[in-house]
Every structure is written in C-alpha cells, then in structure tokens.
Image (cartoon, rainbow, N blue to C red):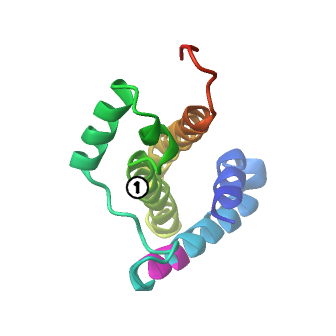
Amino acid sequence: TLSGAFLVAYLTGDEDTYRMHVFSGYAALAALAARVIAGLTAADGSPLRFPRPSTEDLRRWIVRLAAGDSQARAGRSPLIPWMAAALLVGVGATALTGAVADFVTLVEDLHEALGEIALWIVVGHSAVVLALHRLKRPRPLGATA
C-alpha cells in the first residue's frame, strides 16, 4: 500500500493529475501512520515491531562479510533496520510536508525537494534488497564473488 501510494504520488505530481497526487499522498501518509502505530505497539519478536538500527552490528557484519564468513551472508542483514529507518523518515517527511503544503503554500518547494530525495532513498532501498538477495545465493566451491 505504502509503496504503491508513494509511486502514484510521485508520478502524478504535475498539474493535470493533481487530485490523484493529493489522494495518493494522503494514502501514503495514512499507511505510514498505521505502520508507525504498529511498529511502536507490536510485541517483542513481532515482525511488525520496528527493527533497531545498530552501527556496531553493521560494523561486525561488514567485517564478517569481508572475511568470507558464509553465515554472515545467510543471516539477516543489519542493513535492513537502517533502510527501514531511512524509508520511514524520507517518505514520511515527504508525505507530511505534502499535507502541510495543502494549507501552507510556502512548504511546496520543500515538499517537492523531499519527494526527489525520497525517490533516491527508495531506489537505494531496492538496490540494497537486490544486493542482499545476491549475497544469499549459494556459490559453488572455489567461485569468486
């Protein structure tokens, strides 16, 4: 829901499709609000609970990857919480400033700039997901990356 709403809002930002842009922007904001509520109220261990980013876990994981530890490739990446946080902040700020821009036109340029930044966060997230998927693929003995 959130990714679709963001994509539609991004692609309909011109004058001809402004109503669709506003509707999908509010849909993204509602989906984000629901996700934040779920992330804050979910029980420990729930997949809905927000993952906690950790620089130390990320550093250790990178060291293990560099050392060729196959378990580091197989396990859950500590990049995931960082990407989740970046997406929530980037898309959330974009959606929130869009809602504010409906009433305070001075915020429109900020909203547009945040939308461009959020798009790159989404592209970065997609690249990380693909790279992590590639890391998990089994490699034949003796094969290099």
In the rendered image, residue 38 lying in the magenta stretch gets the answer: yes
Q: Residue at x 78, y 49 (%)?
A: 16
Q: Nearer the viewer, residue 102 or 48?
A: 48
Where are the magenta residues, as a range? 34-39
Amino acid bearing label 1: Pro
The image shows residue 52, relative to residue 33, as above or below, that is above
**Number of callouts:** 1
Q: Nearer the viewer, residue 134 or 80?
A: 134
Q: Main secondary structure of the magenta part?
A: helix
Q: Which residue is mark 1?
A: 81
In the rendered image, residue 48 lying in the magenta stretch gets the answer: no
Q: Residue at x 26, y 40 (%)?
A: 60
Which residue is most to the left?
56
Where does residue 67 sit, x and y in percent of width and height? 33, 25
Secondary structure category for the residue under label 1:
helix
Q: Is residue 41 left or right of residue 33?
A: left
Where does residue 51 sit, x and y in percent of width and height? 39, 64
